[in-house]
Amino acid sequence: MKKWYAIQTYAGSELKVKEDLNERVRKRGLERYVELFHVDDEETFFLVPVEEVITSRSRHGAGTEYRIPYEYDLVAKPNERIARGDTIARKPVRHLEKDAR
């Protein structure tokens, strides 16, 4: 049975941590214990939930990457294949209590 793990990192260091973990898996020969994913012609053992955001202010409609915040709920389930365009995380519903004065 496969297991999913979430790793909390400092903002902006997600991709560096992913690369470091990929390198450690390869150096220590742990490939048989971790599933290999193919994303955009790249082989990786770890996924960073990133969505591309295109704003009208960016030059020539260029996109920027946006990391999904850690407070989001992961929708992906263990042993589930993830395809391009699938939802992997969603923003939780927040309820604010009314001030009773």
Image (cartoon, rainbow, N blue to C red):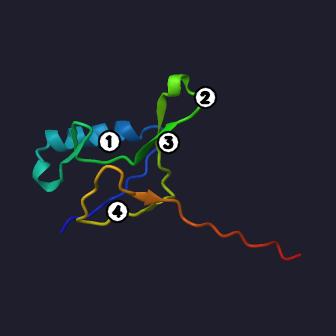
Instruction: Answer whether labels 1 and 4 touch (C-beta < 8 Å).
Output: no
Q: Residue at x 28, y 56 (%)?
A: 82
Which quarter of the rendering shows the N terminus? bottom left
In the figure, 60 relative to 16: above or below? Answer: above
* Circle 3 Cα neighbour tier, 10 Å, few/some/many (<14 / 14–19 / ≥20): few
Residue designated by label 2:
57
- Of the residues tagged 4 and 2, which is closer to the observer? 2
Q: Earlier in the sequence, mark 2 or mark 3?
A: 3
Which quarter of the rendering shows the C terminus? bottom right
Residue designated by label 3:
11
Q: Position of residue 99 (x, y in %)?
A: 82, 72
* Circle 1 Cα neighbour tier, 10 Å, few/some/many (<14 / 14–19 / ≥20): some
Q: Earlier in the sequence, mark 1 or mark 3?
A: 3
Q: Earlier in the sequence, mark 2 or mark 1?
A: 1
Inter-mark Cα distance, 2 to 1 = 29 Å
Q: Position of residue 27 (x, y in %)?
A: 15, 39
Amino acid on which the number 1 mark rests in the picture? Lys
Kind of element beneath mark 1: helix
Q: Position of residue 17 (x, y in %)?
A: 35, 40
Residue designated by label 1:
18
Inter-mark Cα distance, 4 to 2 = 32 Å
Q: Residue at x 36, y 36 (%)?
A: 16
